[in-house]
Amino acid sequence: MQVQLTLDSALPLPRRPRRRIPTLWAIASYWAPLGVFGELDIDQPHCFGCSVVADILDGPLRDRWNSCTRLLDKAHLVDHALNGLDGPQNMVALCYQCHRAMPRFSCGPDAIEWVRSGGRMTLDWLPKPDAELAPCARSGGSHAVADEPQCRNRLQVMA
């Protein structure tokens, strides 16, 4: 027996659940006790990369961080398009310039290292135009063979 579906008889597709992006405060309070970014000063909202400070001094700490959405972006460490999670463990607070300069990473430790090294202030993360490519053992991406121990996926720089 053959079933024929028409537009009228087709069942509606299930709706994708709404993404829940954490607040800047949730991101900062997640990373501060871990010490991954050194002595992360949670008392003043700032970019995790270049350390530019948002001059917001009034109100409770949580409100100061969350009111910086025009100055700080919530950036994925592992790009969302590469199946990066939307939780605070995969996000950092970056200024607009650092977020635009951040390469697309498929490997979390590489992204953390990029942020720790100064974000947009780090020029050695620029792609090498004549680099020989090899598959990355950890992330499956491509990178320069000379950089294989670091697993830096530099060749996918965001436009």
Image: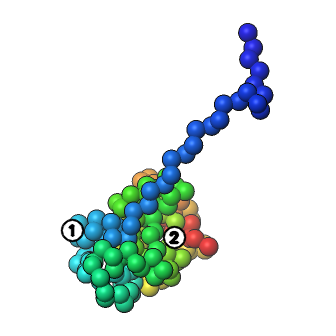
At x 56%, y 70%, the residue is 157
* Residue type, mark 1 in image: Pro
Mark number for residue 103? 2
Task: Please provide percent x and percent y for residue 151.
Answer: 43, 62
Residue 85 visible: yes
The residue where tag 1 is placed is 33
In the image, taking residue 127 as reference, residue 49 lies left or right, namely left
Nearest the camera: 142 or 83? 83
Pinpoint residue 89: horizontal percent, then vertical percent: 34, 60
Q: Which quadrant does the C terminus fall into? A: bottom right
Q: Residue 90 versus residue 133: which sits nearer the camera? A: 90
SS state under label 2: loop
Report, in whole angstroms, how far the alpha carbon at label 2 lies from the one at label 1.
26 Å
Location of residue 5 in the rendering, given as x and y in whole percent from the top left corner: 75, 25
Residue nearest the viewer, comparing 124 with 6: 6
Instruction: Give the image location of residue 123, x and y in percent.
Output: 48, 83
Spot the residue most to the top: 1
At x 56%, y 74%, the residue is 128
In the rendered image, the vertical position of residue 54 relative to residue 132, given as above or below = below
